[in-house]
Amino acid sequence: MEYALFSAAELLGEDGPLARQIEGFTPRRPQQEMAEVVAKALEGKQTLVTEAGTGTGKTYAYLVPALLSGIKVIISTGTKHLQDQLYHRDLPLVKNALGISSRVALLKGRSNYLCLHRLHLFTQEGEASHGRLAGDLVKAQLWARQTSTGDISELGGVADDSPVWPRITSTADNCFGQGCPSFSKCHLMAARRQAQEADILVINHHLLLSDMALQEEGHGDLLPPAKAYILDEAHQLPETASRFFGRRVSGRQLLELARDSRAEQRNDAPDMLAIRDACQWLEKTVADFRLALGLGERRLAWRKVADMPPVALALEQLSRALADLEVELEPAAVRGKGLEHCFKRCGSLREQLAMFAEEASEDFVYWFEAYSRSFILSASPLEISENFQAYMECRPGAWIFTSATMAVGEHFDHFNHQLGLEMPASYRWESPFDFQRQALLYQPVGLPEPHDSGYTQAVIEESLPVLKASRGRAFLLFTSHRALKEAYSLLKDRIAFPLLVQGSAPRSELLRRFRALGNGVLLGTSSFWEGVDVRGEALSCVIIDKLPFASPGEPLLQARIEAIRRQGGNPFMDYQLPNAVIQLKQGVGRLIRDVHDRGVLMLCDPRLRSKSYGRLFLKSLPSIAQSQDIKEVEAFFQTG
């Protein structure tokens, strides 16, 4: 049947092909309405902002009109996991149901593809024959002979944090481009060629923003031109963009430069031993600089440490070590493409590092992150709306932003302001789930204020009868790692249910165990507030310790607060409160994921009742029955 004659809403209806051919598909009026709005935006090249509550089915609501449009559409998602899900599961289902032969392609950033040249270089290093690296390298070598895509997500036998990955993938710094001896077989270039030819291209926000950053610097494009751009999980864009439009220098970048320079010297300039010595000196100064930043993991504004004598001296020595290596690489650059590339990288990193000796621009916030063995120095812009608007102007067409959590109350003003969107068409659809029947919001009384030293202990005490009533089957979501650790120590000997803790295993493994156990209690922080989908009885309770206001010590937040004050605004109402509302909506969204789910949402923060802004949080949540009586919680689970 020729479905081009039907509207998107009809195709998503009870008699449509998706209802007939996709198992478990349920027609929903909000989904059909959203599909019609998206189709209109695609046809009219409009800018559209939509919020579709959990269960609306927004993915199909934009895929159907996108496939029917006949134009090239780029779809960007929030994470690589969602990107894979869209490409490998959702798109094929909808394509087959509609009988459409549109060409679809998947494109990720370069670090997601095997680099054959770097794999070859790594196998020649002595380090590759030792310990964990050796086993992972053998797996990678066997896979490299079989893969047609080079997408590292295919290689499931190697952990995400394996040290082998940065050794066999490339970065913008160390990629040789057309000068690479393996260029004709490059997996990244093959993926980019497929992206050029595709009708529907699936990417993620990091790649979209990388393309924006390259255009801003005048370095060309990563992405092909398109007629329409659909940005799912769009609520993540403003924060992610603020990091992308800045500059950064990391210990990893510097150590990779030293390692690559040494390898290229060994291959193409074995007589130039001074390069090896300069690399060794650079590695030492990187280690010394990390030590100067202090013990433990920390994240602070750069100005808090920049004038400390040990840090200033270590930065000077690090700059000098880069300059020394640049001097040694310059005459060697003619010996080979690899050495030439290392010489250019060295100069670029030295220029970026110089920004932190000056810290001149008031439009940027300078900050650093220190890890156990490495560090990142970052300079991020306070505003990204101009950058984003310039990019949209360079890529004219339909721009569609969608998420389950973008509105604050009933308005999109906060999101629109952050991206510089002026009067876009905007629509909201509530979740079609029956929250009045399926869920209960429990707010315990008598808790101290969140800043009280005994707050987390009080939260756990109030949570114990709820966990008993729910028979485990719960997420406890915290706004800080400190609170999570304290909660674990308080809970571990007091509940009979299996306890899972963020950080003890990869997120995917913890979720697998949680689903399999059926009565687990999982403690998590930020990474479990969104992008987690546990359906059925295994997750029947979500407990949130505090309203998720960002830490006032966070460098980017501090700088934004100061900038808003300089402009005469109200930082709390204009920025902190809207962001917290959106984050809470994400956490709450973990509970009810299906029409058959039932569960209790426990919001512990007394500010929901004691502060006037508490009403805005509650107004932004689905309409849900509320209680302050633990007996009603117990009755809810007994009748389930």
Image: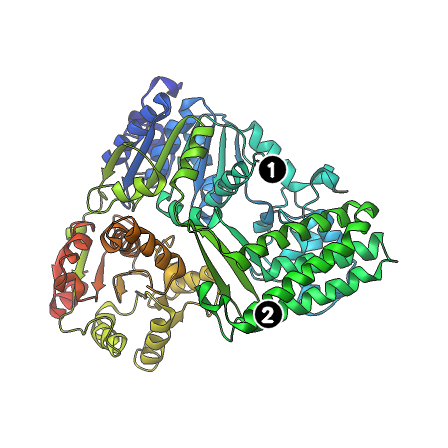
Instruction: Name the residue furthest right.
Output: 271
Within the image, what quadrant is residue 99 found in?
top left
Task: Establish if 445 lies above or below 508.
Answer: below
Check disc 2 and give the amino acid type: Leu
Horizontal arrangement in the rendering, residue 179 relative to residue 80 (left or right)? right
The answer to whether residue 123 of the structure is visible from this angle is no
Task: Establish if 582 lies above or below 462.
Answer: above
Horizontal arrangement in the rendering, residue 179 relative to residue 427 (left or right)? right
Which residue is rendered at x = 23% and y = 47% of the image? 408
Report the Cα–Cα distance between label 2 and label 1.
Answer: 45 Å
* Category of crowding for the residue at label 1, using alpha-carbon neighbours closer than 10 angstroms: few (below 14), some (14–19), many (at least 20): some
> Could you say whether the residue bearing mark 2 is in a helix, strand or loop?
helix
Q: Earlier in the sequence, mark 2 or mark 1?
A: 1
Percent x, y of residue 617: 20, 54
312 or 338, nearer to the observer: 312
Percent x, y of residue 411: 22, 41
Within the image, what quadrant is residue 638 found in?
bottom left
Task: Establish if 385 lies above or below 359.
Answer: above
* Residue mark closest to the camera, 2 vs 1: 2
Percent x, y of residue 444: 16, 69
Which residue is rendered at x = 17% and y = 59% of the image? 440
Check disc 1 and give the amino acid type: Ala
Within the image, what quadrant is residue 76 found in?
top left
Residue 191: assigned label: 1
Residue 313: assigned label: 2
